[in-house]
Amino acid sequence: MIVLVLNCGSSSLKYQVLDMKSEKEFDLLAKGLVERIGEKMGALTHRVPGQDKHVVEMPIPDHTVGIKAVLELLVSKEHGVLESLSQIDAVGHRVAHGGEYFKGSAFVDAKAYEEIEKLCVLAPLHNPANLLGVKAVNELMPGTPNVTVFDTAFHQTVPDYAYTYAIPYEYYKKYAVRRYGFHGTSHKFVAARGAEFAGIDLENSRIITCHLGNGSSISAVKDGRCIDTSMGFTPQEGVPMGTRSGSIDTTIIPFLAAKENMTPAQMEKMLNKQSGLLGISGVSSDCRDIEEAAKAGNPRASLALNILCYSIKKYIGAYSAALGGVDLIVFTGGIGENSAPTRRDSCDGLEYLGIKIDNEINDATHGKDTIISTPDSKVKVCVIATNEELMIARDTMNIVKNLKK
Ligand code: ADP
């Protein structure tokens, strides 16, 4: 089954075309990125395995034009990978927010579309862009089934005592203010792959998954189901990220608003775009730049990394308690897959929990599925390369196959 995976952001979209032979066997036919949608000049970068990348610069006023350009490339003589668009059996869309309605991936019928639209209030920057992707497919490839895969769905098994904030209960009832969690597709993928890789039975396991990228979140997964996660009502909560503060004392907000005369919009920008690793280091939001600056002796860069690792360590401790012990810790995402110092320092001092890292193997591990704990470590620790697109394609394939039954 050929599946087109679309991940539409507000001004960009990523795509992959996968030939799914089974859940585990697949060929990546093409992938790419459309950037600067809505700006004067946009760009489409198209990659076919084994060929040079192909870049097209053109104005891309909206998502429909972007998707149309991608579809044209997919069947073009020179850069195409398909004879005709009718070969695409289904389209899988990454959708940011599934609220409490979507507990798993869904075939997009009129009712599902309406529910995703209702959830735009909870994800005003993301869900509308995701729906533009569905609309564009309906317009350009009518009759092709759309499946939506939600960032929040994997976390819908989190119990009420872990998702309810201790603020007046009426705000949950009135406005659905609660913890939702994000990166669910990645947490689900790496928990399952990590268990398989480490020879642990997923259905009888206690796993902590650390997705560390520009945005970062950590989840506690018991017997394959999520029981807690660090992101909350929005992706703002949890560990410090590239430019997001992560959790802070909420009273800092009115205090600084008064001192600095900041509007709510300015405050949100400060917490979302100017905080985290960037805000502390003053160097960059990019972990590589900060590691370099720290090595060169920049104390604020070192402080930023220390804060990040200390925060990850605290979540590992907290989630070990929540899970009643831990069998496996998985690191993933750009930082989790590539930064050996972050993995080492986050686990440093946790020997009493049974966590022992093999520093030599850890130092040599970049982006490849690897066990980085020592053979005598009670808790296995591994690096797993996340693959959200594959997960989306799998869910899409399974849902569409079931529709046909
Ligand atoms: P996103 O959350 O946008 O998908 P990624 O998962 O790609 O982001 O993660 C981006 C982060 O990964 C950046 O902070 C980047 O510096 C970091 N990263 C990538 N490669 C390395 C590396 N070799 N060492 C340290 N950090 C790295």
Image (cartoon, grey):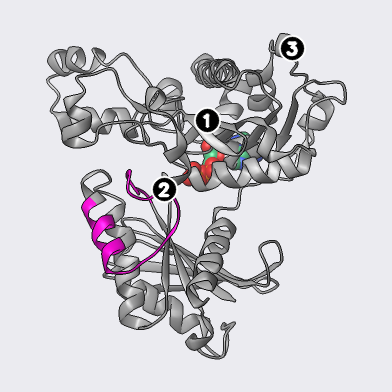
Instruction: Give the amino acid type for the residue marked by disc 2 in the picture.
Output: Lys
Residue 140, located in which quarter of the rendered image? bottom left
Question: With 240 as the anchor, is 341 left or right in this view?
Answer: right
Q: Could you tell me residue 155's position as x and y percent?
A: 45, 39
Instruction: Give the amino acid type for the residue marked by disc 1 in the picture.
Output: Ile
Say which element carries label 2. Answer: loop
Q: How far apart are the alpha carbons under marks 2 and 1? A: 19 Å
Q: How far apart are the alpha carbons under marks 3 and 1? A: 20 Å
Say which element carries label 1. Answer: strand
| Res. 105 visible in picture | yes
Q: Between disc 2 and disc 3, whose residue precedes?
A: 2
Q: Between disc 2 and disc 1, whose residue precedes?
A: 2
Residue where numbered disc 3 is placed: 351
Q: How far apart are the alpha carbons under marks 2 and 3? A: 36 Å
Q: Nearer the viewer, mark 2 or mark 3?
A: 2
Assign the N terminus to one quadrant of the image: bottom right
Q: Ligand 1: does it lie within 8 Å of the C-beta at label 1? A: no
Residue where numbered disc 1 is placed: 218
Q: Residues within 10 Å of mark 3 (few under 14, many from 20)?
A: few
Range shown magenta: 96-118
Residue where numbered disc 2 is placed: 103
Q: Between disc 3 and disc 1, whose residue precedes?
A: 1
